[in-house]
Image (cartoon, helix red, strand yellow):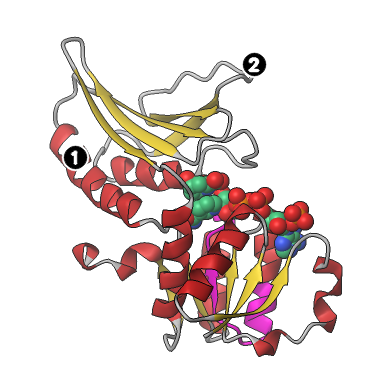
Amino acid sequence: MKIGLLGYGKMGQLIERYALKRGHDIAWTVDANNRANISEMDLSSADIAIDFSTPDAALENISLCFENNLPIVVGTTGWYEHLEEVKATCLEADQSMLYGSNFSIGVNIFFHVNRLLAQAVSPYKQYDAQVEEIHHIHKLDAPSGTAITIAEGILDAYDEKDRWINRLDGTEDEVIPAKNELLIESLRLEEVPGTHTVLYSSEVDQIEFKHTAHSRDGFALGAVVAAEWLAGRKGFYQVTEMFDFNK
Ligand SMILES: NC(=O)C1=CN([C@@H]2O[C@H](COP(=O)(O)OP(=O)(O)OC[C@H]3O[C@@H](n4cnc5c(N)ncnc54)[C@H](OP(=O)(O)O)[C@@H]3O)[C@@H](O)[C@H]2O)C=CC1
Ligand SMILES: O=C(O)C1=N[C@H](C(=O)O)C[C@H](O)C1
């Protein structure tokens, strides 16, 4: 396939490496420097686009791909409040899009087991649930998209909780979750690629369920596999739909 890269930072450049390794070509790359000239570029030289840019840029890039009949895989996080409108536009315009907060196999297994664990623990009200995420200091969004997906899996198992709230370490605001809220604690530390932990704490013990990314390679390989999966499909998909254990 010929792949267009929207966002050519840490992830875009690693995705290029994995795409070439798997026999694909890179048709073009877009970053903040050449974004202004995008209308002069021949986007149709790509079969598919992969977006790892910024939350604002991702929304523009998605629209651009829909206008140009270009299927798009979106790994960028931080834009999910617009998810329903993006999905509606995609389906109305008969376009193809796959998005995911995390493309690594390990985290997708984690998402699956997280839901099972939450169902097992939720009847036992002595356990207080919490999500923690740690990422590098360059990250623009908090909480991480992955932490939001994890929180959604937990909230589905708790009748009495209906939303998450975020506490970003180092900020002044005191955030104390109400009974209907699930706390996501965010920490920004050096160059950490991404660590997510679910904690269930009682007076007598604590259950910890944790995923640690050692590098960004799993995300990058997963994004290329997602592009291969989306090619030839029409419609709006989440990365979770690629995995058999979710069927
Ligand atoms: N779903 C997943 O598995 C993963 C998701 N992510 C998400 O991917 C996103 C990118 O992460 P990362 O690569 O680490 O970030 P970087 O900051 O390293 O890269 C972002 C890139 O986007 C470019 N950019 C900025 N504005 C635009 C624009 N208008 N159009 C196109 N490109 C633009 C930047 O250009 P310039 O450098 O010139 O400013 C840069 O090349 C984040 O939202 C992150 O949360 C990250 C890892 C895994
Ligand atoms: O910004 C990052 O680096 C990452 N972002 C994604 C997220 O917000 O969950 C995925 C991964 O954890 C790395």
- Residue drawn at (66%, 56%), measured in percent from left and top? 9
Q: Does 125 sit above or below residue 144? A: above
* Residue 142 x %, y %: 57, 37
Give the quarter of the image for residue 190: top right
Magenta span: 62-82
Left of 107 or right of it: where is 90?
A: right
- Amino acid bearing label 2: Glu
Three-letter code for the amino acid on which mark 1 is drawn: Leu
> Mark 2: which secondary structure?
loop
In the rendered view, would you say 147 is above or below 95?
A: above
Residue at the spot 50% in from the left edge and 41% down from the top edge: 193
Confirm whether the magenta stretch covers residue 77: yes
Residue 69 in percent (x, y) is at 61, 87
Task: Tell me whether the residue at label 1 lies in contact with that at label 2, contact meaning CB atoms closer than 8 angstroms.
Answer: no
In the depicted structure, whether residue 125 falls above or below residue 18: above
Q: How much space separates mark 1 and mark 2, taking CA atoms? A: 33 Å
Tag 1's secondary structure? Answer: helix
On the image, numbered disc 2 is attached to which residue? 172
Residue at point 56%, 16% (across, down): 174
First in sequence: mark 1 vs mark 2: 1
The residue labelled by disc 1 is: 117
Residue most toward the top? 203
Look at the numbered disc 2 and say if its residue's Cβ is closer than 8 Å to ligand 2: no
Horizontally, is 38 left or right of 111 in the view? right
Would residue 95 be found to the left or right of residue 66 on screen?
A: left
Work out which residue is located at the far front of the displayed protein and give it.
Answer: 21
Q: Residue drawn 63% across and 20% down?
A: 171
Q: Label 2 crowding class (10 Å Cα cut-off): few <14, some 14-19, many 20+?
A: few
- Where residue 56 appears, x then y in whole percent? 70, 56
Q: What label sits on residue 108 in the rendered view? A: none
